[in-house]
Image: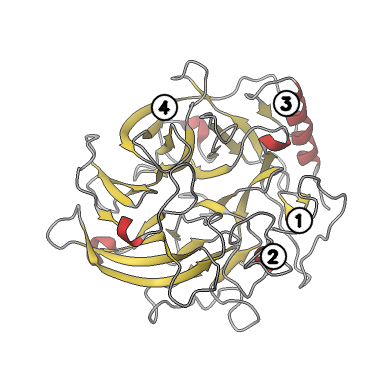
Amino acid sequence: MRISKGFLAISVAVGVIVAGGLLVGVWEQSRSTSQLPPAIGLKLVAQGFASPVGLIPAPDATGRLFVVDQVGVIKVLMPDGAVLAEPFLDLRSRMVQLNPAFDERGLLGMAFHPSFKTNGRFFVYYSAPLRAGGPAGWNHTSHISEFKVSMADPNRAHPASERIVLQVDEPQANHNAGQITFGPDGFLYIPLGDGGAGNDVGLGHPPIGNGQDITTLLGSILRIDVDGAAPYGIPPDNPFVGREGRPEIYAFGLRNPFRISFDAGGTRELFAGDVGQGLWEEVDIITKGGNYGWRIREGAHCFDPNTPTVSPATCPMVDARGQQLIDPIIEYRNSRAGGIGTAVIGGFVYRGAALPQFQGAYVFGDFSVARDTPGGGLFIGTRPLTPGQMWLMQELTVNTSANGRINAFIRSFGQDNNLELYVLAADVPGPTGTTGKIFKIVP
């Protein structure tokens, strides 16, 4: 397996930091580790949610932000910080019943159509009960649905306007990904996990795993044309058009790409935080037709579902079709393997004005240091000095916190129309209560 010098330096640095008992540190490829971690502030802008998993700016001049709460509601956050009492959309009656202690299902994503200002269309991803005729013993069906805004009230959706665009049956309750987004090409990108359970094995998982099976939509990022023929069209340059494989697939070999985002600048790259099995968390830059290795690899390491806690010494560098597997740009050890977190939470490349020192860097996080401890981590990744190496990774210090950490379970990140970033978190790990908060990242 190919391992760059940059990766080796990162591994050594992480090993020293963990051995020394530190959670805050600097990962460097070729620089000194003596520099202090970069610092930020967090400004509370809204609270009272259960499990906020999305913050989407209205594509207009109103300054509104739409808060996607996993429990099944979308609320409107006004520019003055007020959260409107009436939800923009309430999908709770159409969803599966969630486990309040912890659940990866729910209302997981929202995206405004690029022409929302004129057509009022938007799309959501939510977990519905298993559809009639769904595979026996499977858990639920993921819905990608279109809705329209109310003609009478721009702060309310028209609930009867639902048009189900795509249904994907899910064998287990976990690994649902969900942060749908429109790309700069105008197409809708849909991240899907491998179907759940562990190791990509079990009911609903073929012998090679869903991540490597291009005949299933699971374990992939899809790309569809919502303006094409009903229920959706296929972009003609999707990698599997006219050949073996599902034509909706844009990239594959993913375990649970929970959060994805396009860079608002640069070359508009697509980033994904892909949650690991138990050893390695990773961040990928997604390219058309790319295979990101799961379940042959976990991060940049070999993986064997029969020995998931030990990385094999060798594994293929190509998939069953001879295609090169793509390494992540960032990886770090999971806390179960002596590392610093439990699940990577993908974020955004910073393109705002308030923090010029972060310009062009990737801001992301981790759910928590432990499943039952509210200790999410905030990180920044910067491009390497030498192309092809791993990105430089540092943990951010929160100056507005006594211990420098967020002390909550990080759910997601958001970006407003000014390209400033927000952190979405809650005090409890499950979709319940009212401890969910939204913080703006400030100097």
- Element type at mark 4: strand
Q: Give the residue type at disc 2.
A: Gly
Q: Quadrant of residue 212?
A: bottom right
Query: Of circles 3 and 4, which is in front?
Result: 3
Quote the CA–CA distance across marks 1 and 3. 26 Å
- Element type at mark 2: loop
Residue, far bottom: 242
| Residue in the image at 38% along x and 33% along y | 440
Residue, far right: 313
For label 2, the residue is 209
Estimate the x, y position of residue 229 in percent, counting from the top left.
Answer: 39, 82
| Residue 261 numbered tag | none
Residue, far left: 152
Estimate the x, y position of residue 61 in percent, counting from the top left.
Answer: 23, 49
Quote the CA–CA distance across marks 3 and 4. 26 Å
Query: Of circles 4 and 1, which is in front?
Result: 1
Q: Residues within 10 Å of mark 4 (few under 14, many from 20)?
A: some
Q: Give the residue type at disc 4.
A: Leu
Q: Residues within 10 Å of mark 1 (few under 14, many from 20)?
A: some
Image quarter (top left, top right, bottom left or bottom right) of the C terminus: top left
Name the foreground residue: 172 vs 36.
Answer: 172
Q: Residues within 10 Å of mark 3 (few under 14, many from 20)?
A: some
For label 4, the residue is 42
For label 1, the residue is 305
Among numbered discs 3 and 2, the one appearing first in the sequence? 3
For label 3, the residue is 18
Asked if marks 2 and 1 touch (Cβ < 8 Å), the reply is: yes
Q: Give the residue type at disc 3.
A: Val
Query: Of circles 3 and 2, which is in front?
Result: 2
